[in-house]
Every structure is written in structure tokens, then in C-alpha cells.
Amino acid sequence: MRAELTREIADVARRHLATSGAAALSLRAVARELGMASSAVYRYFPSRDDLLTALIVDAYDALGDTAERAESAVPRDDLRGRWHAACRAAREWAVAHPHEYALLYGSPVPGYAAPETTIAPGTRVGLLLCRVVADGVNRGEVTAIADDSDATLVPGLGDQLGLPPGVTARALQAWSGIYGAISFELFGQTNNAVLEHAAFFEGAVDRLADLVGLPA
Amino acid sequence: MRAELTREIADVARRHLATSGAAALSLRAVARELGMASSAVYRYFPSRDDLLTALIVDAYDALGDTAERAESAVPRDDLRGRWHAACRAAREWAVAHPHEYALLYGSPVPGYAAPETTIAPGTRVGLLLCRVVADGVNRGEVTAIADDSDATLVPGLGDQLGLPPGVTARALQAWSGIYGAISFELFGQTNNAVLEHAAFFEGAVDRLADLVGLPA
DNA sequence: ACAACCCAGAGATCGCCGCTCTCGATTGTT
DNA sequence: AACAATCGAGAGCGGCGATCTCTGGGTTGT
């Protein structure tokens, strides 16, 4: 009934998004493809932004699922392997779903404020990476490095993540570095510089593992 | 005459862009503000995309100017200082011009392929950073680290930049890391994690300087 | 000095878009 | 059987990018 049609609309919208990008996503086009009046769609999504929000949450979850699944397939004691698996899965998902990735990590759509519901799913990959590092800390394989960058973070963040001072900021930086590497590739900034993007990414991820102090 | 009006249109458009973002930039609104018919604007910019392209080139140049000016004010032998100055200037420009930064480094506007004219100005900051590292190499203060990531790059890129193998890939990664840090802040990904963004950025930049091997 | 020409701007028009409102029709409940 | 609630359709609003045609004023060439 209602839930069914809601899902159907979201599916068509996701397909349009995947092929043409967020800016080209039109409620009217979705309605046309479903053979219904454009005004009828508003019974299910009060605005285009709400439809977009639903797609964002789905995309965050798809990315989070992919990364978590990949990471969980690696033996727990292979910290660097887990790190690599999560990063590689994230990149591969991004390459396979460029428009959705752009929607998540590209410029925020102007006038569009990320609603509450997108915050939690949006942190899944970051939290996953932090968990790997925290495991390393608990196993005594990652040792804190003297660093006062933690003082720039929200108080209590390290405790919340199970990360000691000197590591939290580095972990956050590593996450942003991974994001930067993926975005540079996807958004074409390295078009004339990098030839084998996957291999280059692997190297970058490895150096970021060094940054957070994962053992070799 | 013609050049004057062209500049005037671009100025108004830039103001609209700065206040409302790229997606909200409308040829008609610009024309309205200038008191002319929307169709008249097409005499000066054949399409909205062309207007956007002009703004992109201007923005790249403004960012490049800012970074280069800041870097050139630091003594030549203070490599890390030059690195920091360039990065800090880039971030401050981005914070002051978020919509323009988003236009440069955010998701590429769907269906909009970056024209040739934007490529050269788009690499200025990256080249500036590479120049700092190359200076360090020439002074013997930066030593190549064994690393096979260079093999993933476009052949000859290292020679072109004056960087030895083992450093080129790291420099590129550092650039993408800086971009990632700025974007994370600007696009709100670190809203609930980082408190003092400027200080956090400084720390990240310092660790990226370590990555490329700049002396302390 | 006059005529030919050119071109910037105006206005109308087209087909999109997001969004709103109203009006029937169907459905399910009292 | 009557009622309320929901749902879809259709018309319509204002705004958008883009195109086309027309007009008036300045420039050029004779």
C-alpha cells in the first residue's frame, strides 16, 4: 500500500540520481516514470528535499554496510588489514556510485540543511575507522603519540570513541584524508596526475594507517 | 563598452554566488539586478554554464593569488613555514568564500564538464605546495623515502614537478589531505567533533608536512 | 549627407521545474 | 447507509534556461 509506493518512488528517484545526479533529480520526472501526476508524489514526500534526504540516508547506510561488511571479514588481529578493507570498500562504493557519493560528501546543496536523521548514518564509516584504531589501542599495539591537537576537539570525544589523546585527532584527520583522496579522484582533480587510481589510493591509505599508528 | 558590461555581469553573478550558492545562481536574477532583459545577458555569456565557468576561473585565481602571496612572505629557507602559510591562506580563503570553494572543490555540477580553461588555474595551489617540497629537495633537506606509489602516477610527473620518486605521490596525497580537511570543516562533517577548526587544521597541516618529509 | 548595415537590447515564447489548491473518487468505518 | 479520511488528477502560480524575432540607434561606406 502506502509503504510500497513510497519505496517505489524512492527507487525510481535513486535510479535517476545514479544516472543524472542530484541537481537533475526532478519530482515530475519521477512521477512521469511512475505514471502518476506530479502532485500525487507530494502525498508521500512533502518536498523534493525530503525525497533527497531519504536518498541520502539510504546512501549513507549502503556505504556504511559495505564498509562494515568488508572490515568484518578480516581477522580481528590484523588491524592494518581491517583498516585497508574498510577504506577500499568505501572507495569502491564511491566509484560505483559517484553521484550518490557526491550527494553525501560533495558540496551541501545550497539552502539545504542536513536534517537530524542524516547525522547518525553519516558517521558510520568514520566510527568504523575509529573502532579499528581503538581495538589497536586496547591490544596495546597502538601507542599514543604526544600531540596537543586533541585539545581542539569537542571535549569527551576521545573517551566516547575509546581513543586516547594524541590519537583521536589523528584518526579524524585520517578519515578526512581518505575522504579527500576519494573525492579528488571522483571529482577529477587528479585526472592528469594519477594513472592507477586504485593503487594510488592503497598507498595513501597505508600512509594514513601509519599516521594513526597502526602496526605494520 | 562590451568588456565593461561583461565584467559587471560577472561581478553581480559573483555576489549572488557568494551569498546564495551556485545552484541558486540565476541568469534572470542577475539581469533583473542590472535592469536588463534576461535575453540580453546571453549576448555576453552564451549560457549559464559559461558564466559559471568564468566565476570558477576567477575563484581559482583568487585562491591561487592568496596562497601564493602568503607563501611568498615567508623566508625561503623556512620550508615548513612556507608550507603552513600556503595551507593556512587556502583554508582562510575557503572559510571566507564557502560557496566559491564549494564550486571549485565540491561535487562537479552534474552535466557540467570542467572546460580546458579551468584546468590550469585549478592546479595553482597544488603546484605551489609541490614547489615548496621541491625546494626542500634541492636544498637537500627533504630526502626521498622508499615508496613505490610513484609508479601509480602519470609518467614524468615527478620530473615535471622537480620531485624525486617516493615524494611525488606523498605530495599529491598531502594536497588531497588538505583539501579533505578544509572540505570536512566547510561541509559540516566535523561539526560535532572539532571545536577549534583553525587550530585543528594547523595540527593536520603539520602532520602532512611530516608526511612529505619537510624538516621540523 | 545619405543609405546600408550591424548589433545590443526588449519582448514573447517554449518547455521545464517545485509547489499549492481544489475537486472528484475510492475506501473503510461508524 | 452516511460519514470521514485518504488519495490521485488536474489546473495553476511563479520562476527557470534558452531561443527567436523585432526594433532602434549607432557605425560605416559611399
Image (tube, coloured by chain):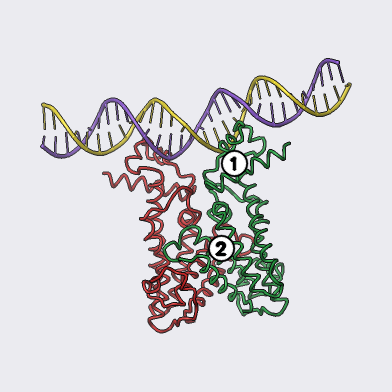
Chain colours: A red, B green, C purple, D yellow
Instruction: Find residue C1 and report its horizontal and vertical position in percent.
Output: 86, 15
Quarter of the view holding residue B86: bottom right
Q: Is residue D13 above or below residue A107?
A: above
Viewer-side residue, C20 vs B169: C20
Of all residues, the one furthest to the bottom in this rendering is: A140
Kind of residue at disc 1: Arg
Judge whether B208 appears above or below A138 on screen.
Answer: above
User: The residue tagged with tag 2: helix, strand or loop?
Assistant: helix
Name the image quarter holding residue B76.
bottom right
Where residue C23 appears, as percent x and y from the top left, is 29, 25
Name the chain letter of the residue that bears numbered label 1. B
Residue type indicated by callout 2: Tyr
- Residue A70 is situated, as x and y percent measured from the top left of the image, at 41, 69
Give the quadrant of the N terminus of chain A. Answer: top left
Q: Are marks 2 and 1 in contact (CB under 8 Å)?
A: no
Q: Is residue B206 depicted above or below A18 in this figure?
A: below
Q: Nearer the viewer, residue A107 or A6?
A: A107
Q: CA distance from mark 2 to mark 1?
A: 27 Å
Q: Which residue is label 2 attached to? A: B179
**Numbered mark located on residue B111 in the image:** none
In the drawing, does residue A150 fall left or right of residue B3? Answer: left
Chain at tag 2:
B
Indicate the secondary structure of the residue bearing disc 1: helix
- At a point 60% along the width and 35% down the height, the residue shown is B31
Q: Which residue is mark 1?
A: B48
Of the residues under marks 2 and 1, which one precedes in the sequence? 1
Mark 1 residue crowding within 10 angstroms, few (<14) / some (14–19) / many (20+): some
Residue B138, image x, y percentages: 73, 76
- Left or right for D3, reference A185: left
